Amino acid sequence: MANQPDPRIFFAAERTLLAWLRTGLTIIGIGFVISRFGLFVQLFATQSLSTALATSTSISAALGIAFVLIGSLAIGSAAIQHRRFVATLTEANLPPAYASEFAFILSSIIAALGMALAAYLWYA
């Protein structure tokens, strides 16, 4: 009984990857909003001629970029962990006609796009 294939193991790994993808995308989204909120503060600072607000603009940008990088790293790490775990499963535990690389490739692309967003926010 203990050696029989259990599809719940694979589907639990898929749900875990999806949860990390959602979490990473949420962190990236929060980082983008924080970074771009600095533009609003900068506009307000130019209208009120305040130099203290101009300093908070760079802090907002740096904090936003940090969030975007952390979210991207979370997605990349989750993709690697998922790939390693799926590699340990037997063929009987995988669904038939499952493309095992699809989830890894998609997650890697999302992580790379997150890194590109962080670079854009840094240089823009």
Image (spheres, helix red, strand yellow):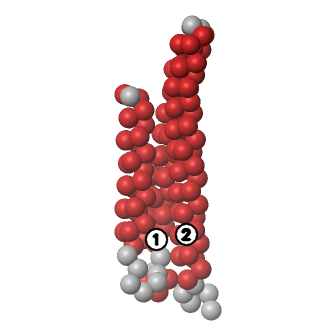
Quadrant hosting residue 16 = bottom right
Q: Position of residue 94 (x, y in %)?
A: 46, 81
Tell me which amino acid carries mark 2. Answer: Ala
> In this orientation, does residue 100 appear?
yes
Across and down, in percent, residue 93 comes to 50, 83
Discs 2, 1 touching: Cβ within 8 Å: yes
Q: In the rendered image, which residue does mark 2 sit on?
A: 13
Q: Secondary structure at mark 2?
A: helix
Pick the front one: 90 or 60: 60
Image check: 67 left or right of 88?
Answer: right
Relative to 35, is 41 above or below?
A: above
Residue drawn where x is 59% and y is 80% of the image:
8
Quadrant for the C terminus in the image: top left
Task: Give the secondary structure at mark 1.
Answer: helix
Q: How many C-alpha atoms fall within 10 Å of the one at disc 1: few (<14), some, or many (≥20)? A: some
- Foreground residue, 83 or 60? 60
How many C-alpha atoms fall within 10 Å of the one at disc 2: few (<14), some, or many (≥20)?
some
In the picture of the structure, the residue carrying the numbered disc 1 is 86
In which quadrant will I find the N terminus?
bottom right
- Please indicate whether residue 121 sits to the left or right of residue 8 in the image: left
At 58% from the left and 53% from the top, the residue drawn is 23
The residues bearing labels 2 and 1 have C-alpha atoms spaced at a distance of 8 Å
Point out the residue furthest to the right here.
Answer: 1
Residue 68 percent coordinates (x, y): 50, 40
Q: Name the residue located 60 percent from the left edge and 10 percent from the top edge.
A: 48
Judge left or right: residue 99 versus residue 29.
left
Mark 2 / mark 1, whichever is N-terminal: 2
